[in-house]
Image (cartoon, rainbow, N blue to C red):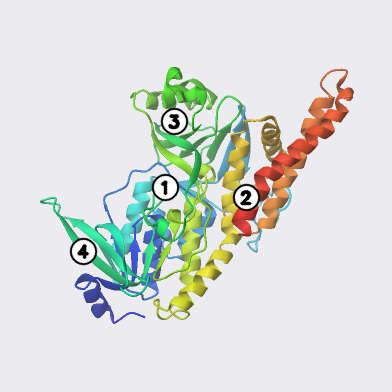
Amino acid sequence: MGSQPNDARTRREIYHEADVVVVGAGIFGCAAAYTFAQQGRSVILLERWMHEPDRIVGELLQPGGLDALTKLGLGHCVDGIDAIPCHGYNVIYNETPVHVPYPPRDQNGRLTNQWYGHGEKGQRDVGRSFHHGRFIMQLRKACLGHENITVVETEVVNTIRGEDSDQILGVETRTTDKMTGDKTPDCFFGQLTIIADGYDSKFRKQVTTSKPAFRSKFYALELIDTELPQPGYGHVIIGHSCFPVLLYQIGTHETRALFDVPMGIPEASPDNGGVRGYIKNHAIPALPESVRPAALKALEDGKIPRSMPNSWLPATKQTPRGMIVLGDAHNMRHPLTGAGMTVAFNDVLLLSELLHPSRVPNLDDSDTLAAAMKTMYWRRKNYTSILNVLAQALYSLFAANDRELRALQMGCFEYFKRGMTDGPCGLLGGIIHRPIILAYHFFSVAFLAIGLHSIELVSAGPLGILKTPLVFVDAILILAKACVVFLPLIWREGFR
């Protein structure tokens, strides 16, 4: 444990020493710094730029993430930022919508329809959507006001290792003088250094050789005063004419539109007008009619919309030697399902439990820290395997580019139409933490897709019965495709 408050503050501000040094005042970094400070640890939080960030992701917080945020003592950070309640999804498949709300709980707080169907009565969980920068500033405000945290605006450039070991002792930084622009070298030391420097981490390579993989980018528009078909819900637009599009309100007057554009598609080639041409000619026509005018107006400025890579980075085991890498620097999934912040806050919750001062009095105890991180790696899979697999698997279905995937896509939509929504939406919302339920619903969709496809083949014309052999072949191909999509993901995310 740290020193008395005044002594700890002196150590942080004069000698740049603390129990914990956190690199990155983003979603994970702020939550981790605040939580450790609440436990009585002395914390230094380092951030390159403390002005309000302007990002196009990290704008939807699922109910499971909001619950974790509240348990961390930071639930108030969604207040006063014009956050919009989110009650679930409106999935629009080839212009046909289906309503997928978060599941209701009974009077004992239990989800009664995890395996089958949907409930009509009960209290439903709610998420929040908002401007990312406003939320970040609320998290930073909470850290700035905490007596056990010192926040420093400085650029971290390297880690500091011991002379006779590979133990990380802290970090080297460069602090810019705002008046002169001169950069002054500095150092900060901690028993434990937590790196949370985001998706483009410069320190990730110190703990893993894995690199993020991405097949597409999200290009963003901000729509003003548009009318969504189902207010208070996230909208997912899928179909044959375009790749997935997300719509969700982030303020009273603002709605975020995210257009998925795979790398190298002909529709976004320079000859076809590039990304703007694809959005204008293929994606916007697939939007609900009430949304198209605002989307076209937002596209009129002639600039290429801002973008972010849609990355997948499975978590890897870490052997902490005074440093751990977490947040997006450690684990990412496709943002289609809006699960990033939910994973981050649940990770902080688990980390703070495993490293609580009652369990780990001294954070420089390498053996105890290593045991805690091993436990965390496996225990976090109860929620991360679900959210990560869902994100990657649903993207494969919603961005279907072959016959079998389109059959699975149709099966998924029909599954929702038939009222099988509580389980899938509970998984998406970070409410259900049982991977077996994910496997059940995924393969239920696969077998429904096989049935629908078989009926379509046999009923196509008077000689459709002659296609019976093809029905069996296609059934095997569709099931094989489902296995190819799902099984490698669940193995990588759940068992490795």
The reply to whether discs 2 and 4 touch (Cβ–Cβ < 8 Å) is: no
Is residue 346 placed above or below 391 in the rendered structure? below
Is residue 148 placed above or below 84 in the rendered structure? below
| Towards the viewer: 156 or 450 | 156
Question: Mark 1 or mark 3, which has the lower sequence index?
Answer: 1
| Residue type, label 1 | Ala
Q: Nearer the viewer, mark 4 or mark 3?
A: 4
Q: Nearer the viewer, mark 1 or mark 2?
A: 2
What residue would you read off at disc 4? 186
| Towards the viewer: 490 or 113 | 490
Question: Mark 1 or mark 2, which has the lower sequence index?
Answer: 1
At 67% from the left and 32% from the top, the residue drawn is 406
Spot occupied by residue 79 in the image (x, y as percentages of width and height): 39, 54
| Towards the viewer: 112 or 221 | 221
What residue would you read off at disc 1? 83
Question: Mark 4 or mark 3, which has the lower sequence index?
Answer: 4
Q: Which label number is shown at residue 489?
A: 2
| Residue type, label 4 | Asp
Q: CA distance from mark 3 to mark 2?
A: 37 Å
- The residue tagged with tag 1: helix, strand or loop? loop
- The residue tagged with tag 2: helix, strand or loop? helix
Question: Mark 4 or mark 1, which has the lower sequence index?
Answer: 1
